[in-house]
Amino acid sequence: MQRILSSHLPTRVGETVRIAGWVHRRRLLKSVAFLIVRDAAGLTQVVVADPAVRADVTALPEETVVEVVGTVTANGTAPAGVELTGPTVRPLGPPAVPPPFDLYRPALTAALPTQLDHASVALRHPTRSAALRISAAAVAGFRAALDARDFVEVHTPKVVATSTESGANVFTLDWFGRPAYLAQSPQFYKQLMVGVFERVYEVGPVFRAEPHDTVRHLAQYTSLDVELGFVVDHRDVMVVLRDTLAGMLAEVARRAGDAVATLGLILPEVPVEIPAVHFTEALRIAGAPPDEPDLAPAHERTLGEWARTAHGSDFLFVTGYPMAKRPFYTHPDPARPAYSNGFDLLFRGLELVTGGQRLHRHADYLAALAARGEPVEPYAGYVDAFRHGMPPHGGFAIGLERFVARLVGAANVREVTAFPRDLHRLTP
């Protein structure tokens, strides 16, 4: 008899079926027992009236893996309106050692460090697994939105010979006796691939050896990177970003609707045109000094509140960041060279995306590096490509975990990361 998932039971009323999963909860009454079995699709209620089967169920702790054969019976009070009656229950392994928290409760009551220490079982809780389902759907939407616009997915090295972006911290490793580094981003490679395919994207890990110990930073996270050629300026990039976000959220609604419902979410709408303010105007709105070189988290929160009040939008572009705070490959604003053709996208008052137009002329790269006192040699393989003809181009990168955390309202990005890596954590 083929195993079926709990979600298929409503169409099999009156049939004898086989399910399998984990013992989610047991309720042992005097004359009957209720066994709740959890599988990847949800929960199934099993009604146990036979004394011998009830005795077997009594000996099965929560999280024990079992197989159940029974008759699908309609019951409006049971999950999905059906339950299994007249069952046989067979363990598929030894009795489980109960985890240090109850997975059958509506919310995990254990502190986050305890959950992370026992991630393999904490992730079984519906609220934790729902966030990961939403993450998977968001990535599927990211790919679909860009595939529909003739982008090509690429895969670039994660071990590199030099720092990807000057000034940022990198993880060093031994590469057959030579120093090497974990890539901080695919930035240089995705720019070079614009010279091949014009439009590219990548989904992959990036590594930042920055000793942050905050609720919004990880040392390894998943970056959704995009680069496109033949742009006029950064505004072309912002249009693609807007459409990509809309596609991601549409796929979350389509593919992960049950997870959205589990978490009680209302997905945000992406405006047809996301409101945008120049960095100088953003400082004024946030009440920051006019000579402030960057936006602090408090400024971002104020701007998020302003966008919601003034424009009814959960999203806000801040454009024209000072060149001094942007990487050397950023294209300056021709009309205001001290400011960049770069942007950040704030999502509910939190920086989610950084992007902009890049330099595309070889001479401009040499000048930009010289102006920052940077030697050309570490970047020679990258900069040399611009001698061979590169179109005006730009791109952006979305931090997946930060996006999902903001979307589901998680207080800490680690709540939506399966096995986070940060300043303190290398296991499990």
Image: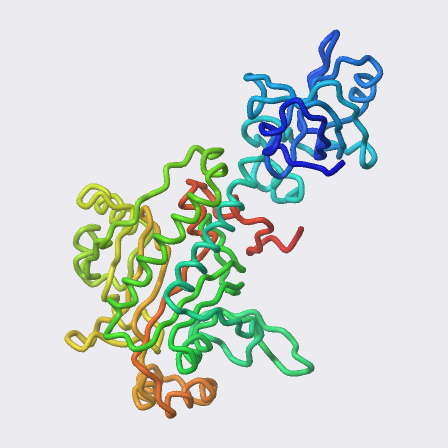
Task: Specify the farthest residue to the left.
Answer: 335
Q: Looking at this view, is 215 or 272 the one in front?
A: 272
> Does residue 114 appear in the picture of this structure?
no
Quarter location, residue 21: top right
Q: Is 118 drawn above or below residue 104 in the view shown?
A: below
- Residue 19 lies left or right of residue 353; in this view the side is right
- Residue 146 lies left or right of residue 32; in this view the side is left
Q: Quadrant of the N terminus?
A: top right
Task: Tell me the residue at 66%/23% (across/down).
Answer: 72
Quarter location, residue 339: bottom left
Task: Specify the farthest residue to the top.
Answer: 30
Quarter location, residue 181: bottom right
- Residue 324 in picture, x, y percent from top left: 29, 72
- Residue 65 in picture, x, y percent from top left: 75, 34
- Residue 318 in picture, x, y percent from top left: 25, 59
Q: Looking at this view, is 402 or 219 the one in front?
A: 402
Task: Specify the farthest residue to the front.
Answer: 14
- Residue 368 lies left or right of residue 339; in this view the side is right
- Residue 286 in picture, x, y percent from top left: 21, 50
Q: Is 187 drawn above or below residue 400 in the view shown?
A: below
Task: Tell me the residue at 53%/46% (across/down).
Answer: 132
> Does residue 337 appear in the picture of this structure?
yes
Q: Is 283 drawn above or below residue 163 in the view shown?
A: above
Q: Is 192 drawn above or below residue 414 in the view shown?
A: below
Q: Looking at this view, is 105 or 78 the one in front?
A: 78
- Number of numbered discs visible in the structure rendering: 0
